[in-house]
Amino acid sequence: MHPLNFAHVSPDLPLLSNLTIEDNIALITRYHSNVSRGKILPVVEKLMEDAGIIHLKGERLAGVNKNDVFIAKLLRACMIDDAVIVIERPFEMLSGQKSFNIIQETLDSIKNMYNSCIVLDYEWHRNFYGKAV
Amino acid sequence: MKGDIKFKVGLFLVLSFAMIIFSAIFVMVVKDVFTEHYYYNLSSDSGDGLTVGMSVQFSGFQVGRVERIELTEDGIVMIRLKIPSRHSKWFRKNSKFTLEKPFIGSPRITVTTPNMQDEPLSEDETIEIKTIDDINEVIKKAQPILERFDSVAQNIEVMTDKESKLNKAIENAEKIMEDMAKSDGLLEMLTGDRQSAQALITTLRALPELVDEAKNTISDLKVVIAEAKEQVFGEEGTVPSVNALLSDVDLKFKELDKLIENLIEISDDLKGGTKDIDVLRKEIDEAVSSASSLIKDIRNNLPFEQKKEIKLP
Amino acid sequence: MLRAKIEQVGGWAIEKWDFFKDFSIFVARFFRVLFSKDTKKGVILDVMVMQIYFTAVQLLAFFLMISVIIGTVFIGVVLSTVKNLGLSEFLGDIIVVLVALEMGPLITVLLIALRSSSAINTEIAVMRVNGEIDSLISYGIDEMSYLYIPRVISVTLCVLVMSTLFSIIALLSGFIFSFTIFDISAAAYSELIANSITLRDVGVLGIKSVLMGFFISIIPIFYGTRTKRQFNMIPVSVLKGMMSVFSAIIIVEALLLALKLI
């Protein structure tokens, strides 16, 4: 297993504030696969469309709400081939959300882009997950 | 990344590099990098003042540069000039080359060509270069001036020495000024003695009185003489003693005239600030005493009352 | 008391030595990554384009205006002084040395340092405090090759290009004064300047620009990476970084001058 297949989504790992949302998502593939921006951008845009954040195209971190940032982080993690996504403390990244539904919906929308997903959270957040746990 | 950012950056880089390359080519063209060059050889006994890249000038215009300087095995300095082809026409067989070392400015090689119709200078020829050293010329010219400056400096040193005459004169002047400040007057300062000055002043004050007295005496004397003439040169005959006395009086008159003249001179001298006050004072004393004795003599020798007594029958 | 003072001096020396050592390691790593085959050129180029845009293109109009004004005024002052002193013979050399070799790189570097070095220092410090650098590292992106190398190369390139542009524009605008004061024709002026420029001058200008460009970019980056993870430490980092940038400019200037004199 390639160590990069592990894709971490965490409150401690923010998006880069000097890049647009789509550039943030595209960065990992561009860097590791040396792909040009022009080539990767359609893939990223399709992904954003599927996840319902295409309206964030061209936006930077400052103009985006917390929930959208979480989805963007999730999409960034998906850019790793055959990724094993590890979501750490998701409710710290979501504002006012007390349900796992939004996470589940996003993961469902990009289910072809990752291998598996692990969520790490506090015990006292167990009830936020409902039937999923 | 927006496309126009890429375009702007690309345009900036392309234009900047184009400008830099254009400037570099321009400089190279002006520096005759792309021009055909002629190379002329000069020789000199010394490489002093010669540098690679130094200017070669014709009629004050730069026509080339020194490309290389070499010291040959036999100790001669070989200079290779690099001249662009457009300036090679100034280099003729009769051309003379001089290394000028101006007092201000960098050294240069100057070319002079008396006859422009002469054959062009061959690149194989080696011409000896002359040197005009302005700095050394100036030093040579300046040498005697510097020597004179040296002696002037020495003189000033002697003059300003503690024991020098100038210093002493200044000290004396200071002393005189001090004396003037302290003493009552110029005379005291000149005589250096307060009493002498007082005496001189008293004498000078008495002078007009003495002169008046002398004048009065003389006028009296004239009257007496007139009377005596009447009496002595009368038909009654001449008394030998009176004659002698009269001649004596005549003599005294002359002396008295001199005395008066002297007195007037002395007073003038004193007014003009005669230096030798002591001598003057002596003269005045002598004059005054002789005047007094003269008057005494006259008075002693002229018993007017007796004359009346001598009245001849 | 004396022991305490000596300890203080020792502590200061150790701190400075550690800093110098860390900086040397950082620079060594910079070159190792720069010449590494693994360095991804594609992303670097994009970052470089952005950095050149911020450093040079956005500054260009102001920079050109400054170079025309300073070039004209400065050459005017030099020309009139040279004329008064009777040193017209050295006119070309004085202008080339002062404008092209000294003022060009110095003013360019000061302008870029004022604008870009402080921005780079702040940007890296913010990224460090915010955990963005950790994000990059956790996704296997080498911060040296992605963040630092493109910035240093861009700023160095900008200083080199812009100081050359400054020299060219200043020398061109100097013609106005040479024409009015000395009544020198365009041909004579260009010959005067061109004859005074040597390959060595161009070399010195290049080396100076590259050295200064390198230091005014790598120093603020280094200070940015050392920022403690508190937001209130960002201005402290920028302050220290900029002081070191100016010290570096003076040191490079002095070293090159010393080399010239040797």
Image: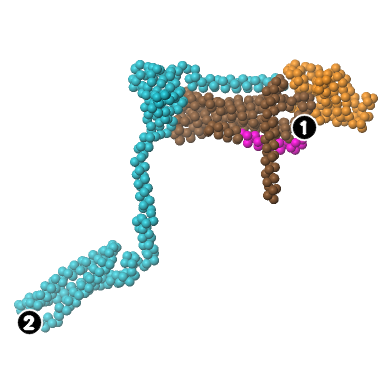
Chain colours: A orange, B cyan, C brown
Figure quadrant of residue B140 = top left
Mark identifier at residue B312: 2
Residue to which mark 1 is pinned: C130
Task: State the count of labels.
Answer: 2
| Spatial separation of the CA atoms under disc 1 and disc 2 | 161 Å
Figure quadrant of residue A104 = top right
Figure quadrant of residue C38 = top right
Residue C130 vs residue B268, the one in the foreground: C130
The residue marked by circle 2 belongs to what chain?
A: B
Q: Measured from the top left, where is residue A66 in percent x and y?
A: 83, 28
**C230 horizontally vs B262: left or right:** right
Q: Measured from the top left, where is residue B190 in percent x and y?
A: 32, 65
Q: Which residues are magenta?
A: C228-249
The residue positioned 69% from the left and 37% from the top of the image is: C18
Mark identifier at residue B104: none
Tell me the amino acid under the disc marked 1.
Answer: Asn
**C250 horizontally vs C124: left or right:** left
The residue positioned 69% from the left and 40% from the top of the image is: C14
Callout 2: 10 Å neighbours few (<14), some, many (20+)? few
Q: Nearer the viewer, mark 1 or mark 2?
A: 1
Q: Is any part of residue B208 visible from this angle?
A: no
Q: Measured from the top left, where is residue A56 in percent x and y?
A: 79, 23
**A25 horizontally vs C168: left or right:** right
Q: Can you say whether A78 is above or below C222 in the image?
A: above
Q: Measured from the top left, where is residue B188 in percent x and y?
A: 33, 67
